[in-house]
Image: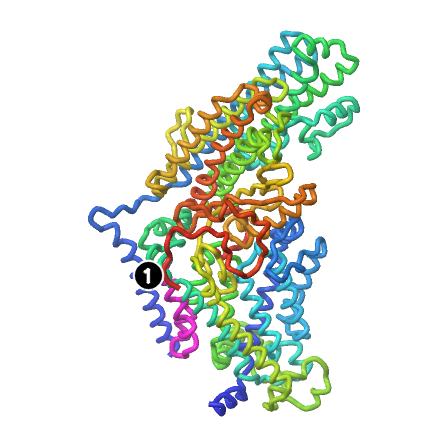
Amino acid sequence: MYMKENLITMKRLFFLALLSLTFACGDDEQPGGGNEPVDNFDRQEMLFNWADNFIIPGYTALAEKTNTLKEAGASFSETPDATNYTNLVSAWEDAYLHFQDVSMFEIGKAEELRLTNNLNIYPTDVDALNNNVLEGDYNLELPSQIATQGFPALDYLLFGIADGQDALIEFYQTDANADAYLQYLKALTLRIDSLIQAVLADWTDTYRDEFVNNTGNAATASVDKLVNDYIFYYERHLRAGKIGIPAGVFSGSALPQNVEGLYSKDKSKALLNRALDAVQAFFNGTHTTGNSNTESLKSYLDYLEIQKDGQNLSTIINNQFEAARTTASELDDNFSTQVENDNTKMLATYDQLQLNVVPLKVDMLQAFNINVDFVDADGD
Amino acid sequence: MRLILSKYLNSNTDAAPLAVFRILFGGIMCFSMLRFQYYGWIEQLYVAPDFFFSYLGFEWVKPLGDYTYGLFFLCGLSAFFVMIGWQYRLAIITFFLSFSYIELMDKTNYLNHYYFVSCIAFILCFLPANARYSFDSRRYNLSPNIPRWSIDSIKFMLSIVWFYAGLAKLNSDWLLEAQPLSIWLKAKYDLPVLGALLQKESFHYLFSWSGMLYDLTIPFLLWFSATRKIAFVAVVVFHILTWILFPIGIFPWVMIASALIFFEASTYQQVFNWINNLWRSFSFAELRRPIVSFGQTTLPYSESNSSKPNLSIESKTVTTPKNTTARKFTLAVLSLFFIVQLLIPFRHLLYEGELFWTEEGYRFSWRVMLMEKAGYANFKVIDPDTDRSFYVQNGNFLHPLQEKQMATQPDFILEYAHHLEQHYQREGIRDPQIYVESYVALNGRRSEPFIDPKVDLTTIKPSLKPKTFILPFKGEIKGF
């Protein structure tokens, strides 16, 4: 009796399996194959592309620059003359631009070290910075110290502490506290370099393999995490940080002191453009490393045939990146003066950046079924 | 009719299925609380955030700061006592209250599964689930026989969940577009073997249709003894599959364990005998004794028990099928509960507009896995006194999960707007006006404008009234 029922159960299960198989094979044999893509989009190829052609090369290039920055910082603090100053400024600018290429990858070690928070929070808290220098007793690893270090703090020390290059060099040569400031400046360049070297070392030692093999579809999987990071960066640091906040979008009144590169004055636009290029290149998967894999958010969207109003969603997103770039090209090199003189152009750029949030955050996330956070769900 | 009903209400049955249900339910719930703490969710969801979304009428239910851990501990502890059947009545009432309180603290974390647990716990408060295999039954010599309706009420609750979940799948998105399964299954590319198959459209339809048929038929197949075993196999296969495919936590195990209650006491007897035989064949001769004894551990009910506190009520109702007040009360409460259960999932008929879009009457209706929604809501604050206006960075107020839930559900958007109003009033804006520009993408469609951007949300009070500030859905979904 028991055996017989078991047998029936087995038979039914077998039948069910057979039915599924028939279903599965059925559409392969359809004439023309229908319009359904049969091949699996290999998301791991996308992870390979991201790790090997964007993240690791990005950090490798940045690490060279921060190493130069560290050496230039040491030389200048040793001998604060015009030559060393020029070298240091150019090393700072180089590293700052390269940082824009990787700032969106806040994952793994970078997430653990809260890299963007430690390297690019602006405006710098000048009072707290001066306090650090004069007291000489500070711990840059504390969360309370994010606005006293990184590239913006160097921006202040290299351009803001006195008016003009000659006055600056004179300050570092003659001021009563010059030595304390030079030591602080050196400490900042050291810390930038050590943070970047730590992140790069982690990627090349172990994290790369962990990253490319974490191929699942969960909030903790690489694709989900990095896409969330990417959109967070675009919304928070690029759209809001570089344009929206100084333009007063979130405060109702313009905040010209809140631009990136406040003291160097002519770097804001270059930094924005670099970040915009990086974000778009990552979206498209286009790289210059010579490796062959190119799978990207764009090719993934195209594979899924995601369209909106008769157009590929990827085209819409790329067009919008272009529109934002075009509007931004109207801006002054110095966003601070732009905000003060004609804020409408800043607001127009913000609007163009904003227009890409919905396609990226709503349409793309839905298409990929990206999980926002690791919690139980029942799909409603 | 009246006679049949009264005969039914007075008929008794062996308590074994309900007792086993109690043990498994208590055990899984206790595990569930430990799991919640293990993943750091108490901190992440209830202690760290500054703001919580409330259910209408339950605004007073909020997390208790650091005491929230104590609440979870109490909930887990009471689940443990439910499992072992020690002071059962007190334990299950404590569990029901603490668990429901937890669920009411933030509706961001609403899951049908949690609601199901609350419903079952509520019913269990009225049932003699400690009549067997419990410390109580030994201590108070409880009768192993209990009213038939007490087991049937759990079965009925389960049947409502499955059947209504099946009804809700009778819509064009689910059946004709295979949405949202199509989106979800495609994303499971990295599963061995299954991953490649799940890319195929035919599989999305297979899963959609078989899921619908499963939900609609499984209650009946479990009630009838002829189909019960095959139905249980289907329960196991179906729920394990959902466990593999979707991040739905412990729910599959709850459902598999719950489905066991459909088996007769005699089946439990067979299984226990089988286990005993197995045990005997492996153990030494002097240790030969049954590990699970059936029908012998409990003594017949004796009147002397009635002097003992706590558990006398169900003992009395069991052996003396008279219409005592307590029994009348229990039956009345449960009847009312089930009438409400049967009606509530239909309350969306009171609202116009597409249910999936407006979500008016969506929750508490066993609509499970029906929607993939993504949204974005950009709030604009205007100070009418100065004409100053600015946008809100939602990340400053909400954690990512809250932001995601808020952006797709109108009642969340409204509540958040009122929270922003209060915040900016404290910041010194006398009468902030709050507008939202929002987009939602539903079940694979592209994003569409969601909330009327011309409505000042601070002028609308949260209520059950139709939400006129929702823009109409441009797509069409036919069906239940």
Q: Position of residue B460 (x, y in %)?
A: 57, 53
Q: Please tell me in which quadrant of the rendered image residue B395 appears.
A: top right
- Frontmost residue, B169 versus A68: B169
- Frontmost residue, B406 versus B99: B406
Q: Chain under label 1?
A: A
Q: Which image quadrant: the C terminus of chain B?
A: bottom left
Secondary structure of the residue carrying tag 1 is helix
Residue A18 in view in this figure: yes
Q: Is B271 situated left or right of A140 in this image?
A: left
Q: Is residue A13 above or below residue A67?
A: below
Q: Position of residue B394 (x, y in %)?
A: 58, 43
Majority SS type along the magenta span: helix
Q: Is B441 situated left or right of B108 in this image?
A: left
Label 1 belongs to which residue?
A: A17
**CA neighbours of label 1 inside 10 A, class few (<14), some (14 to 19), many (20+):** few
Q: How many marks?
A: 1
Q: Please tell me in which quadrant of the rendered image residue B392 appears.
A: top right
Q: What amino acid is at disc 1? A: Ala
Residue B245 in view in this figure: no
Residue pushed farthest front? B385
Q: Is residue A132 above or below residue B110?
A: above
Magenta-colored stretch includes residue B223: yes
Q: Is residue B42 above or below residue B81?
A: above
- Frontmost residue, B341 versus B71: B341
Q: Residue at (35%, 41%) from the top-left corner? A: A309
Residue pushed farthest left? A31
Magenta-colored stretch includes residue B265: no
Q: Position of residue B475 (x, y in %)?
A: 38, 52
Query: Over which residues does the magenta segment extend?
Result: B208-234
Q: Position of residue B180 (x, y in %)?
A: 40, 53
